[in-house]
Image (cartoon, rainbow, N blue to C red):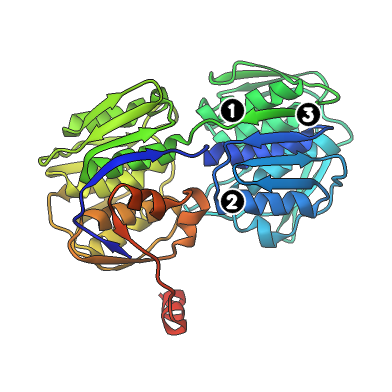
């Protein structure tokens, strides 16, 4: 429940990167000794991955923002669909298990429903390394007599495929070269932990990554980078209702594309060493946004940005070149009074119209954030269901917003309301 109309000010501390954490935890499987990862975000995806590792035999100590994983008792057991279907990034278990044991059996991954996001590039990479891949009864089977380094060109730039191939290649024989690799900061984070284990990786953060496979990987300790998407979400939130909001524990360079668009809209953004100060403007201007692979505008911020554009004056066009089904939040914003039309991969936003609180539903993680942002500047109270999606990727979302002066709270849904939600 979000009560709109309250100005925001103060500081908010950014957690560790969700998109790193969900790859770094499976990466620990590759080691032959305990691995500690800290600055973890306290989100449900981390808990699901911890459960998955324990299920296959790991000794896992999850203590607040730190996790220690002892992989020495892990066996390549089949991973059932139950937990796997709760999150998309469970597919990183494929690359890690294949790299360590030369075999894996994993139910098809779930997570946010953003339309077709095929894992064909992942499979292409595994096959190039020498794995046999088959799809049987809703599970993917991976087998290899041995993994050998290969030159792999990704047909599309894919963060998931880049990371998965890196994981599998870290213990393959010889050199692997990934061309047209993704360049996101999370790729560098994964390369850093693998290097700390003893892997030899060069070029992470560029479009060509070279990996020299190592037979045995050591234990290590690793600190996750700050979450640039969480930081961007709070920057957008501050742009809608912020008198002066300081976003702490960030890497400003990771947010340059968003910073440029906010400044174009008339928002005051001041970058410091590891923080950003954002001051909103009463007369925001509409802008055009196109999502691109890093360092372009992140697709994960498209939905929160759409809510901001609904407040800005004039017409804006937001185009998502990454996921063509990432517009499910728009019907919900329309329920609140927004004037938005979708044409193909673009949404045309006629902004500056007063939004009113309504009953809406979060269809995925970033859509949930978008609806909360809209609720913060809408008149009256917005009721958002499906908030389990938000819990997957934002640590203490409402507590952090309340700390800035927002008014929002949770209420238990009645059985009748839950049935209505399922049928809607």
Does any portion of residue 345 appear in the rendered image? no
Name the spot of residue 56 as percent of width and height, x first: 81, 51
**Secondary structure beneath label 1:** helix
| Camera-nearest label, 2 or 3 | 3
* Element carrying mark 3: loop
Which residue bears the numbered disc 1? Answer: 189
Residue 256 in the figure: left or right of residue 268: right
Relative to 240, say whether 267 is above or below: above
At x 80% / y 40%, what residue is drawn?
A: 70
Residue named by callout 2: 45
**Residue denoted by label 3:** 219
Q: Which residue is depicted at the point 52% across and 53% down?
A: 392
Q: Quadrant of the N terminus?
A: bottom left
Mark 3 burial class by Cα count in 10 Å: few <14, some 14-19, many 20+: many
Q: Does residue 255 sit above or below 339 in this rendering?
A: above
On screen, 422 above or below 239?
below
């Amino acid at each position: 429940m979000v009560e709109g109309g309250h100005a925001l000010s103060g500081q908010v501390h950014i957690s560790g990167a969700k998109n790193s954490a969900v790859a770094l935890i499976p990466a620990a499987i590759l080691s032959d000794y305990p691995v500690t990862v800290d600055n973890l975000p306290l989100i449900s995806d981390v808990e699901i991955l911890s459960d998955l590792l324990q299920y296959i035999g790991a000794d896992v100590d999850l203590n607040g923002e730190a996790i220690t994983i002892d992989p020495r008792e892990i066996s390549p057991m089949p991973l059932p669909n139950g937990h796997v279907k709760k999150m998309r990034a469970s597919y990183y278990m494929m690359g890690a298990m294949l790299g360590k044991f030369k075999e894996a059996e994993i139910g098809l991954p779930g997570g946010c429903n953003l339309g077709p996001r095929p894992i064909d590039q992942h499979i292409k990479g595994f096959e190039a390394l020498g794995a046999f891949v088959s799809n049987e009864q809703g599970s993917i089977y991976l087998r290899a007599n041995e993994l050998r380094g290969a030159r792999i060109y990704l047909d599309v730039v894919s963060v998931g495929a880049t990371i998965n191939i890196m994981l599998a290649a870290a213990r393959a024989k010889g050199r692997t070269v990934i061309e047209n690799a993704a360049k996101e900061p999370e790729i560098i984070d994964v390369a850093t932990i693998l290097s700390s284990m003893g892997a030899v990786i060069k070029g992470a953060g560029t479009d060509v990554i070279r990996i020299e496979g190592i037979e045995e990987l050591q234990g290590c300790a690793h600190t996750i980078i700050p979450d640039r998407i969480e930081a961007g979400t709070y920057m957008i939130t501050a742009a809608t209702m912020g008198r002066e909001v300081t976003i702490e524990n960030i890497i400003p360079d990771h947010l340059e594309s968003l910073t440029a668009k906010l400044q174009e809209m008339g928002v005051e953004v001041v970058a410091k060493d590891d923080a950003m100060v954002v001051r909103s403007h009463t007369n925001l201007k509409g802008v055009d946004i196109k999502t691109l692979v890093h360092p372009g505008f992140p697709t994960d911020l498209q939905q929160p940005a759409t809510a901001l554009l609904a407040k800005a004056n004039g017409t804006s066009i937001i185009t998502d070149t990454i996921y063509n089904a990432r517009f499910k939040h728009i019907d919900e914003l329309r329920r609140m009074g927004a004037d938005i039309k979708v044409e193909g991969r673009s949404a045309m936003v006629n902004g500056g119209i007063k939004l009113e609180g309504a009953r809406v539903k979060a269809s995925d993680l970033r859509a949930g954030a978008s609806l909360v942002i809209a609720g913060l500047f809408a008149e009256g109270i917005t009721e958002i269901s499906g908030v389990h999606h938000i819990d997957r990727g934002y640590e203490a979302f409402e507590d952090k917003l309340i700390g800035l002066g927002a008014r929002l709270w949770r209420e238990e849904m009645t059985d009748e309301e839950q049935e209505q939600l399922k049928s809607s």
